[in-house]
Image (cartoon, helix red, strand yellow):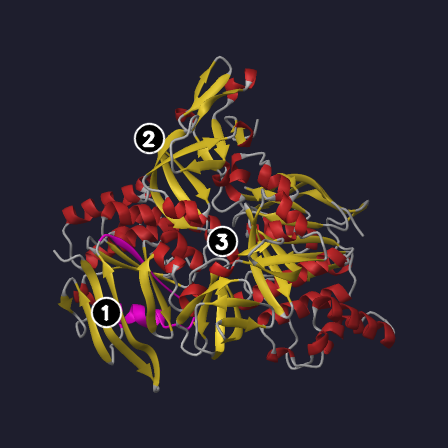
């Protein structure tokens, strides 16, 4: 399988720089998710790896072989798109074996590959069915299976779940997760959905404005964002930010209306411009406790698994906190909160974590 | 003034003999964020069209501000409308786009200026007013479209699934904008959606729409905690609640995968036990119903994992916090125990969908 190495890859469309001088290695035999908001350059980057677009400048290598200008069909890659590509009027088996027929494989080998991939994706029972009888989640599995059966070195997925019916989404996600754990291929997966990214990725390459701003495991990128953008983009809701106007720096320590303690940061305290705190890092109590600060509950709403999400006001400073259902149900307008110092992230002027 | 913004009484509408709205009634109050939440096919779009006056009704009454407007045309109802699709006029500036609904009702220049100031402050788009739509980002366009919907000064606004199809980060921001807008304007927002997460994050009052009827209405917290129908429990909650079919005899609910003592004395063949994801706990717990499970998929939601499990032939879902490392370790085993809290179980009549009782204890 191939490592994919990008060297100073740039793609411009007129005045717009879609991909901005990216140098990056996508490691072989792992799942790399390109995650970011629309317009961040993730699809353009994938299209250049596929050979569907050519970089304006820079080079792309598959291991040590340059692929920058190699045509798509000679790159030994598979591709799965947003809308399932299927051949209507034929069976699922026929759909899976069609690309193999032109590859000079023995009949036995073709049957073996089709049976294996059907097994992997849970399609064995529908192999003789006609594709138009199946829901679009199953059709997408067929499109995935066809690419896997060809055994390319790299498989690219462009938002394969986005347009699938909500009822079939989960099964497709489960199936892809299972598939990815068994495949040896280098997998690149493009999405704007953080849940999908965190569920499927070995590493997430978070993109913004044509740049990869952080590439880490889902756990690392959630727990240790390197920028304010990463803290905001990962998580629902994203990280809370406390801007400079609510921070007081004195003798290398920082205070804020959000917590009662003084946080010692040494010389670094001078460059702190923003604090980041996740909603679940704020401990909330319905009664006054020593060492806590007082906040007003502006709004309550319900989140995942019945937890309450609180909009809290510390004077003019607004943040979101997450509390268990029973506590959320019982609290009134006033609450008392604390935050452990180690769950606070500090950012500098440029929005980079210190 | 009455505190009722909109009352809908016994609304009926059929197409080709099929009832789409079936004796539907509800009351939406002034200064409230009312969310009508129904699954696809429950009758949402027909309901919106009848409220707006774009569709006639077979019978029933639509009463705005105490006045029956059932047969009146759309223009006379004085409702603000924020539609599902956000098409802005590309050749108009942002200001002209926002003013457009006011031009239709021939508002004065002073009224238009007031409206533009009010909504552009509310949605923080004051510096965009002279720009054209193609100079705006996706998020800015959505804000302008919401501002346009709010520009007509009235006391009732209908929001027809306005966030559908937007990416989730944009939705997160617009949800805050919409809640703040309703609070500052102190008007009635009537918001229609099929997305439970929108209902849970926006609603003060919630109305559950199922098969053309409002099957339950109340404050968000009350409907969440005390669903009176299976539709309420399954529609309002994320991830969606688990339902296990079974039967009751001698006050015991029995299914393929567990049994529990219930407060229902009548024997019934066809019932369904509902339990929310948070009613399931990984690992063994005393006094709970302990069953063997295997892992299907962990969905990483950020601060939590949605954990899909298989128990016998049934798939169940629970939620585990990222920080709860001890519980997450349980999932490393091939099979493990999951417990169902008896008091978190609601029993529904599978035919009528009505709640008929609760779980009491392990047997």
Q: Position of residue A225 (x, y in %)?
A: 58, 36
Which label was assigned to residue A315? 2
Q: Which span is picked out in magenta?
A: B31-54
Residue A269 lies in the magenta-colored region: no
Disc 2 to disc 3, C-alpha distance: 30 Å
The answer, for residue B140, to whether it is visible in the render is: no
Residue annotated with mark 3:
A305
Depth check, front residue: B282 or B253? B253
Tell if the residue under mark 3 belongs to the same chain as the one under mark 1: no
Q: Chain of mark 3?
A: A
Q: CA distance from mark 3 to mark 1?
A: 32 Å
Residues at marks 2 and 1, common chain? no
Q: Nearer the viewer, mark 2 or mark 3?
A: 3
Residue B40 is one of the magenta-drawn residues: yes
The residue at the far left in this view is B1
Residue B212: tell me if it is visible: yes
């Amino acid at each position: 399988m191939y490592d994919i190495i990008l060297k100073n890859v740039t793609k411009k469309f007129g005045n717009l720089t879609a991909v901005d001088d990216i140098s990056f290695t996508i490691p072989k035999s792992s799942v790399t998710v390109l995650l970011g908001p629309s317009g961040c350059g993730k699809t353009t980057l994938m299209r250049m790896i596929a050979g569907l677009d050519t970089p304006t400048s820079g080079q792309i290598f598959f291991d040590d072989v340059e692929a920058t200008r190699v045509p798509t069909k000679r790159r030994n890659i598979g591709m799965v798109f947003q809308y399932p590509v299927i051949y209507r009027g034929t069976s699922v088996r026929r759909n899976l074996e069609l690309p193999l027929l032109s590859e000079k494989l023995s009949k036995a080998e073709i049957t073996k590959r089709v049976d294996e991939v059907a097994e992997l994706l849970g399609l064995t029972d529908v192999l003789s069915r006609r594709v138009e009888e199946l829901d679009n989640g199953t059709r997408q599995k067929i499109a995935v299976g066809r690419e896997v059966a060809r055994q390319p070195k790299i498989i690219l997925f462009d938002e394969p779940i986005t347009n699938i019916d909500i009822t079939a989404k989960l099964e497709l996600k489960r199936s892809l997760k299972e598939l990815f754990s068994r495949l040896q291929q280098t997998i690149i997966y493009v999405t704007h959905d953080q849940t999908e990214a965190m569920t499927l990725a070995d590493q997430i390459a978070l993109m913004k404005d044509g740049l990869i701003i952080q590439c880490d495991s889902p756990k690392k990128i959630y727990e240790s964002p390197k920028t304010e953008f990463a803290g905001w983009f990962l998580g629902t809701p994203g990280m809370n930010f406390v801007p400079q106007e609510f921070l007081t720096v004195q003798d290398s320590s920082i205070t804020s209306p959000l917590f009662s303690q003084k946080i010692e940061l040494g010389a670094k305290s001078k460059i702190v411009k923003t604090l980041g705190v996740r909603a679940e890092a704020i401990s909330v109590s319905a009664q006054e406790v020593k060492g806590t600060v007082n906040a007003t509950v502006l709004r309550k709403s319900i989140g995942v698994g019945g937890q309450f999400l609180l909009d809290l006001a510390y004077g003019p400073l607004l943040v979101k906190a997450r509390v268990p259902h029973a506590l959320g149900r019982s609290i009134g307008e006033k609450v008392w909160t604390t935050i452990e110092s180690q769950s606070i992230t500090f950012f500098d002027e440029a929005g980079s974590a210190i | 003034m009455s505190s009722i913004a909109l009352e809908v009484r016994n609304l009926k509408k059929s197409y080709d003999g099929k009832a789409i709205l079936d004796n539907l009634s509800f009351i939406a109050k002034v200064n409230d964020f009312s969310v009508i939440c129904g699954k696809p096919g429950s009758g949402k779009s027909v309901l919106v069209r009848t409220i707006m006056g774009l569709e006639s009704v077979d019978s029933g009454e639509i009463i705005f501000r105490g006045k029956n407007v059932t047969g009146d045309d759309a223009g006379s109802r004085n409702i603000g409308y924020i539609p599902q699709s956000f098409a802005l006029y590309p050749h108009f500036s942002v200001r002209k786009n926002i003013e457009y609904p006011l031009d239709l009702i021939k508002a004065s220049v002073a009224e238009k200026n007031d409206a533009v100031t009010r909504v552009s402050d509310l949605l923080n788009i004051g510096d965009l007013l002279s720009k054209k739509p193609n100079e705006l980002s996706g998020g800015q366009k959505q804000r302008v479209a919401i501002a346009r919907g709010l520009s007509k000064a009235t006391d009732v606004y209908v929001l027809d699934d306005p966030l559908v199809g937007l990416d989730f980060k944009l939705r997160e921001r617009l949800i805050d904008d919409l809640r703040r807008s309703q609070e500052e304007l102190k008007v009635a927002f009537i918001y229609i959606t099929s997305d439970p997460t929108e209902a849970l994050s926006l609603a003060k009052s919630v109305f559950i729409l199922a098969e053309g009827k409002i099957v339950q209405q109340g404050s968000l917290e009350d409907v969440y905690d005390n669903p009176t129908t299976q539709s309420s429990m399954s529609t309002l909650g994320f991830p969606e609640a688990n339902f296990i079919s079974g039967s009751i005899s001698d006050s015991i609910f029995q299914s393929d995968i567990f049994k529990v003592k219930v407060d229902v004395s009548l024997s019934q063949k066809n019932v369904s036990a509902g339990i929310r994801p948070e009613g399931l706990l990984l690992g063994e717990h005393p006094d709970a119903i302990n069953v063997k499970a295997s892992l299907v998929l962990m969905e990483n939601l950020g601060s939590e994992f949605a954990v899909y499990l298989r128990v016998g032939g049934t798939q169940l879902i629970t939620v585990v916090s990222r920080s709860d490392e001890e519980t997450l370790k349980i999932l490393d085993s091939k099979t493990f125990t999951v417990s169902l809290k008896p008091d978190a179980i609601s029993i529904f009549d599978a035919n009528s969908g009505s709640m008929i009782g609760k779980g009491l204890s392990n047997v």
